Image: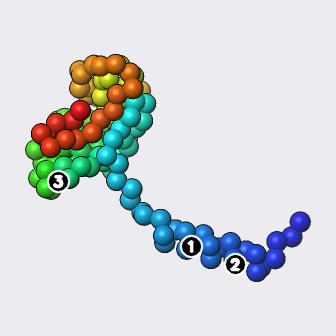
Amino acid sequence: MSISPATILIFLSVSAILLLLTPQCMAKTMLFTGQKLEEGEYLTWGPYKLVMEDTCDLILYEAGESIWHTNTYHYAKHCYLTLKNNGNLVMYSGERQLWQSNAYGPSGNYVFVDDQHQCR
C-alpha cells in the first residue's frame, strides 16, 4: 500500500500543530503510589517545588531557594523517586536504594508539597 505525499504532508502538519499546542512541561502537584519522579521532574504547589535533580539529590525549593534536600548529591546516576504502597518515599538508582523518608501509612497514599514546607 502506497501513501501519497499529500497524506504524509497532512499528517506532519497536524503533528506539528499538536506539538505546538501541547505544553512542553506538565507540572505535577502529586505523586501517587507506584508512580516515579524521574531526574528533572518535579512536584509543585504555589511557591514550593520538590525537584528530583539530575545529580540524584531531591531538593525542596521555596520561591527558588533551596530549603531542604536529601543530601544524596552525586551518590549515583540515573536516580528516581517513587512512593511505595506502604507510604514510604524512596529514591533509587537502578535497584539500589539511596534514600527513604521512613514515613509509612496505608496504601493509596500520595505525596504533595504543602504550604508548611513539608512533603506529605
Based on the displayed image, in which of its 4 quarters is residue 88 positioned? top left
41 up-or-down from 106: above or below: below
Q: Could you classify mark 3 by the number of other residues whose Cα lies within 10 Å: few (under 14), some (14-19), or many (20 or more)?
A: some
Whether residue 73 sits left or right of residue 3 in the image: it is left
Q: Quick one: which residue is furthest to the bottom in this view?
A: 6
Residue under pointer 2: 9
C-alpha span from label 2 to label 3: 43 Å
Image position, residue 80 (x, y; %): 36, 38
Q: Viewer-proximal residue, 67 or 106?
A: 106
Colour scheme:
rainbow
Residue 89 visible to the viewer: yes
Q: Nearer the viewer, residue 57 or 116?
A: 116
Q: Residue at x 38, y 43 (%)?
A: 38
**Quarter residue 98 falls in:** top left
Secondary structure beneath label 2: helix
Q: Which mark is residue 16?
A: 1
Q: Secondary structure at mark 1?
A: helix
Q: CA distance from mark 1 to mark 2?
A: 11 Å
- Please, what secondary structure does the residue beneath circle 3 have? loop
